[in-house]
Image (cartoon, grey):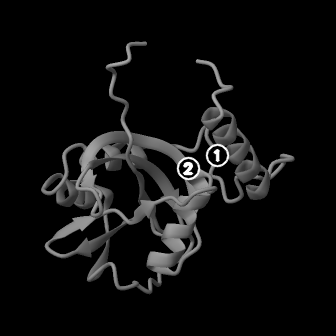
Amino acid sequence: MSDTTTHYVGKLTQKAILFGPDDQVLLTKCDDHWEPPGGTFEYGETLVGGLRRELQEELSIDSRVGPLVEAMYGGWIDDATGAPMVTLVYRCETDERAISLNDEHDAYAWLPSETAATRLADAFVRLDRAVERAAAFDGSQPFAAVTNPYAATDVNRETVLEQLAALRESVSSGSSSE
């Protein structure tokens, strides 16, 4: 690897193509556009855990996170740095229909997947494709919705944080190799 290589350093955001109990997709309105709910994950969280937390904070619902249906660069901008973020979009499900929005959103709508795809296509490149992929998912293996990312493992959040701290220490002391 060349010393002149510039590595991407930025934030990752996650969005949910969230299907409700009647198979409609939830979109949230923020300022002048509609978008899928979600947000950035916090240090020490798993991707699944972070997205579930965001949906709980933004919508006051419990959710199940299914397969990744889209990955994109530049759909959202980091407010602090102005840099484009990498966005991962997942098919998610909830048994709840009642939503309680936090102050990040102005409105919400449950829509048929085709209508949601059209509405998202107006504001974001490739999000219509994410809705189409999520709607086509039939639940077959190898994917299964996840509610607890640490289930059936010996790993927990504290272990992950300890491993990250040890890795950072080894990198800062120069003992890591690529």
Q: Is residue 17 above or below residue 178?
A: below
Identity of the residue furthest to the front in this view = 173
Which image quadrant: the N terminus? top left
Compared across the picture, whether 64 is left or right of 79 comes to: right
Compared across the picture, whether 171 is left or right of 133 comes to: right
Q: Position of residue 157 (x, y in %)?
A: 73, 57
Compared across the picture, whether 88 is left or right of 33 comes to: right
Near-viewer residue (18 or 75): 75
Give the labeled residue for mark 2: 66
Q: Residue at x 35, y 85 (%)?
A: 103
Residue 137 in view: no
Question: Which quadrant would residue 164 be assigned to in this image?
Answer: top right
Near-viewer residue (165 or 30): 165
Q: Position of residue 15 (x, y in %)?
A: 40, 57
Q: Residue at x 77, y 57 (%)?
A: 158
Residue 170 in view: yes
Q: Earlier in the sequence, mark 1 or mark 2?
A: 2
Q: Position of residue 156 (x, y in %)?
A: 78, 54
Question: Which quadrant would residue 76 be assigned to in this image?
Answer: bottom left
Compared across the picture, whether 46 is left or right of 80 comes to: right
Binning the other alpha carbons within 10 Å of mark 1 as few (below 14), some (14 to 19) or many (20 upward) gives few
Residues at discs 1 and 2 in contact (Cβ within 8 Å): yes
Near-viewer residue (4 or 38): 4
Which image quadrant: the C terminus? top right
Q: Residue at x 39, y 41 (%)?
A: 9
Binning the other alpha carbons within 10 Å of mark 2 as few (below 14), some (14 to 19) or many (20 upward) gives many
SS under mark 1: loop
Give the labeled residue for mark 1: 144
Residue kind at label 1, given as amino acid type: Ala
Residue kind at label 2, given as amino acid type: Gly
Cα distance between the residues tagged 1 and 2 = 6 Å
Q: Is residue 45 above or below residue 33?
A: above
